[in-house]
Image (spheres, rainbow, N blue to C red):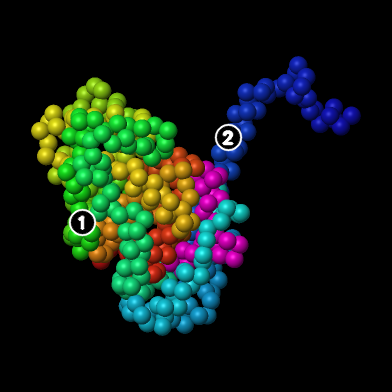
Amino acid sequence: MLRRRMAYADPSSGKDILGNRSLCFIFICAFGLVTLLQQILYGKNYIKSAQQFSRLKGDETGNWTGPVNFSDDGSLKPARNGRKRYLENYDGSFEYNSTACRELRQEIMDVKVLTINMASRKIHGHGYPSSFHKSLCLSARVKTSDLFERWRNLQVCRWEQNKEETSNFKMSLSRCCNAPSFLFTTKRNTPAGTKLRYEVDTSGILPITTEVFKMFPDDMPYSKSQYKKCAVIGNGGIIKNSKCGKEIDSADFVFRCNIPPINEKYTADVGTKTDLVTINPSIITERFQKLEKWRRPFYEVLQNYENSSVVLPAFYNTRNTDVSFRVKYMLDDFDSQRGVFFFHPQYLLNVQRFWAVQGVRAKRLSSGLMLVTAALEMCEEVHLYGFWAFPMNPSGIFITHHYYDNVKPRPGFHAMPHEIFNFIHMHTRGIIHVHTGQCT
């Protein structure tokens, strides 16, 4: 009776007024509208929040008179009294060993682990896979926004290398990994006739023939603590508008990941100097047809990096080997003097085990973490730029995934939040310097 009075048409009857396609279209439009409104509302909350504080080295300078906490609904509340008494009258940098900085560092060190038992609802609906949501979240007593707050507060402290902490960490790396001897395959550490076992395809073995042996350098081109100041450049959107290019180019040695763009559009933020750049074979496969056809486009891309050396994970699995070798053949055909190196698979396995003990457990470590690990043995002082694994910067403002695009990573492959969390701890301990704000 009620259906007749309301002129309701049963969708299961043959008199469907709208039809399944129309209903589906309406549902999609409604879902899209709700998502758009959600992003607008969240964006307003973050922008409103960001205007209440200064990033100290960033763009957002507002009416901040003391640190604040973000509540779940985006509103602000006063920070803990311990922090506020140091920062509400902030005027310049605090010394590394001042009482204020020791307490601020301890607040970050008090956050021990990243867990997967909850998700931050602030980032839902913004294109990140569920596994990313879960891995972002801290233990129940510390939320992501609280970590951001602690990190922001620490920026008032002038970073200083802790010689003892750095030395102990480097000794641990030397015992487990020994980059000055085993970072790349060389004629010294991989003689002709060796049966080289792959990193992942452990059942696969590559006999080191005379032809393969000729591609290896005689010995490692780098030695322990050879460089005073090194810069490792990640590709994260956090480096966008940082104006760190000149500072990066002033480093003694610069590492870059996966041949990112460094043309005039990005120079001010990321610089141009490059001494070593990684190349993931998947890039060659997807963008350059495995170098089976035209090779000049790939050669011209490498010209942007002047005389930098390139390194590839040729022995990660059997699929990577031929593609990686083609890079060497191609550069030889063009009479290039550029060094071409291949990661030693045993070194990468040892690095994976080392970071697993630190809480970074992933199917594959990122190229950035591999380079940071090597840099810690090759350089006296290591600076990181462009490393950040969260969809917001420390001020809560949304950023792109890369500085040059917003293509998301394949879910479940890397453990980027855990990697960055370790970097934040290492910065706090004075082992590496992580830059997330603007450079002066």
Residue at image location 71% in from the left, 22% down from the top:
17
Residue type (three-letter) at the residue carrying disc 1 = Ser
Q: Nearer the viewer, residue 355 or 347?
A: 347
Q: Is residue 254 magenta?
A: no
Vertically, is 141 above or below 30? below
Residue type (three-letter) at the residue carrying disc 2 = Cys
Q: Earlier in the sequence, mark 2 or mark 1?
A: 2
Q: Is residue 127 magenta?
A: yes
Residue at image location 60% in from the left, 54% down from the top:
118
Q: Which residue is mark 2?
A: 29
Callouts 2 and 1 close, C-beta under 8 Å = no
| Front label number (2 vs 1) | 1
Give the magenta-colored segment's residue range.
126-151
> Which label sits on residue 277?
none
Residue 346, percent across and down? 35, 45
Question: Quick check: 92 left or right of 150?
Answer: left
Question: Quick check: 151 left or right of 20?
Answer: left
> Which label sits on residue 223?
1
